[in-house]
Image: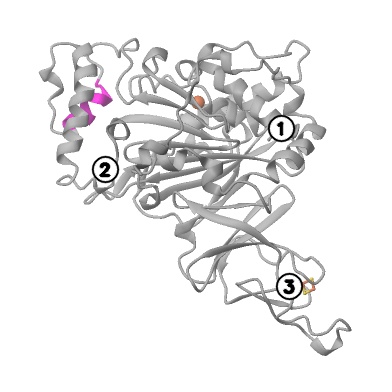
Amino acid sequence: MNEATRIEAPLDGRDTAHLRGDAIGGERYFSREFAQAEWDGMWTRIWHVAGRTAELIEPGDFVVHTFLKESVICVRQDDGSIRAFYNSCGHRGMRLVDGASSVAAFTCPYHGWRWGTDGVLQHVQDAHDFPQGNPCGKLTLKELRCDTWGGFVWYTMAPEGPSLHEFLSPMPAVYAGYPMDTAVRVAWYRIQIDANWKFVTDNFSESYHTRTAHPQVPPWIDQDVDTARHEMWPAGHGRTVQPMRPSLSDRLPEGVPHFFDDILRAWDIDPDSYPSFEAKTMQGWLDLKAAKRRLWKEKGFVHYEHMDDEQLTDSPHTVMFPNVTISFLPDNLVFFRSEPHPDDPEKCFFDLWCMAFPVEGQDTVDSIMAGPKPCREVEQCEHRVFDNGRGIPELAGQIVYQDMELAEGMQAGMHSHGYSDAYLSAQETRVRYFHEVLNDWIEGRR
Ligand code: FES
Ligand SMILES: [Fe+2]
């Protein structure tokens, strides 16, 4: 069966008829009870990203994903599969490891119990001293379901429920021709911000804020509301697909060099060959698709091979419920994620992984959100605190920095007696839909 025939048709993400009308009250952004309900009803049941398959190459390579108070190890097995275990020793519960590394076995720092990478207990001190019998070969670390998609390693704490691909559906089918796992992570940040994690999903569920918050974007990605496709699916995933061409309503002043002209030239198209700005924008964008289709191989853009026409020239900004957003750009895969802070619902961690597709002869790539970078895997995550921008000065002026600058003010506004619910435009329908799906999870309807 053709992959395309299996894609579930989206709902219109501008149609408010799909909404119940649940209020987006302020309390859900700061209440500890609400945060607990999210843990009980949602976080323990959804699929989480632990890391990238590129971090787990050899048997024994592992990553630890710590989420709120929980911690999970994902480790590459001798047979090439990846398995996930709770990061808690079967003796008295000690956390076994942190970070990411490679081991032959996990040795507990407390009493030295040694667990194989398959989770089976291999060695204990004084094995004869256990009235229950020697625990070696009998005890195992508690295992979780683990799977991969898109070059990411995922796990779920739910012993039963949807498989990863069912949970993510229809995204694996939608992006089947997009070679996610060949992208190289060129910038890697985890930034603590003073806002509830939902601010990030809200923010990525609409482009209505772009003209105000990111004035540099409209000449690059068309922000006109009627030229975008707004899509959402019943599982809570959604996306805005915008053409990567200038918005017709946001022209740069005459004479100002236009980024789009450089893109056209890079694909052997003369931007001066069009009779008007409108023609260059609309016809040039079509010509660009055709040129990429024709020239990808000779120009070394091997990642274009199976992309569809839309992926070659558009920006599908995709939110996967509840907290993962991926921009599937023609030359960049940008991964964003927010996770709650373990001690304070008014803080969160914002992950920014900028990935780019290697192109022959290109040593430097545009990371999109963190400036130009060498085209090679970064080894370490940068852990920062946003601190009004002081903690991450090198990102000043970048799109994500502009978003983070808004987070604290939004968080503060959620406490105001002047705020009771959002008053949304149609193009923000997905914001309310996200909260309604979240309510479904925590109220036991999913
Ligand atoms: S808690 Fe791990 S060996 Fe004792
Ligand atoms: Fe933004």
Residue 109: which numbered mark, if any? 3
The numbered mark, 1 or 3, whose residue comes first in the sequence reads 3
Q: Which residue is mark 2?
A: 304
Q: Is residue 262 magenta?
A: yes
The kind of secondary structure element at disc 3 is loop
Q: Is residue 195 visible?
A: no
**Residue 435, how many percent across, how many down?**
65, 26
The kind of secondary structure element at disc 2 is helix
121 over 403 or under it: above or below: below
Q: Which residue is mark 1?
A: 445
122 over 395 or under it: above or below: below
75 or 42: nearer the viewer:
42
Left or right of residue 96, residue 249 in this image = left
**Quadrant of the snapshot with the N terminus:** top left
Name the residue type under label 2: Tyr
Q: CA distance from mark 1 to mark 3?
A: 42 Å
What secondary structure characterizes most of the magenta part? helix
**Quadrant of the snapshot with the C terminus:** top right
> Do labels 1 and 2 touch, CB within 8 Å?
no
Furthest residue to the bottom?
A: 128
Report the coloring of the rendering: one colour
Name the residue type under label 3: Pro
Residue 58: which numbered mark, if any? none
Left or right of residue 74, residue 79 in this image = left
Rendered residue at 54%/44% (across/down): 166
Judged by depth in the image, the label closer to the viewer, 1 or 2, is 1
Magenta range: 257-265
Rendered residue at 25%/45% (across/down): 305
The kind of secondary structure element at disc 1 is loop
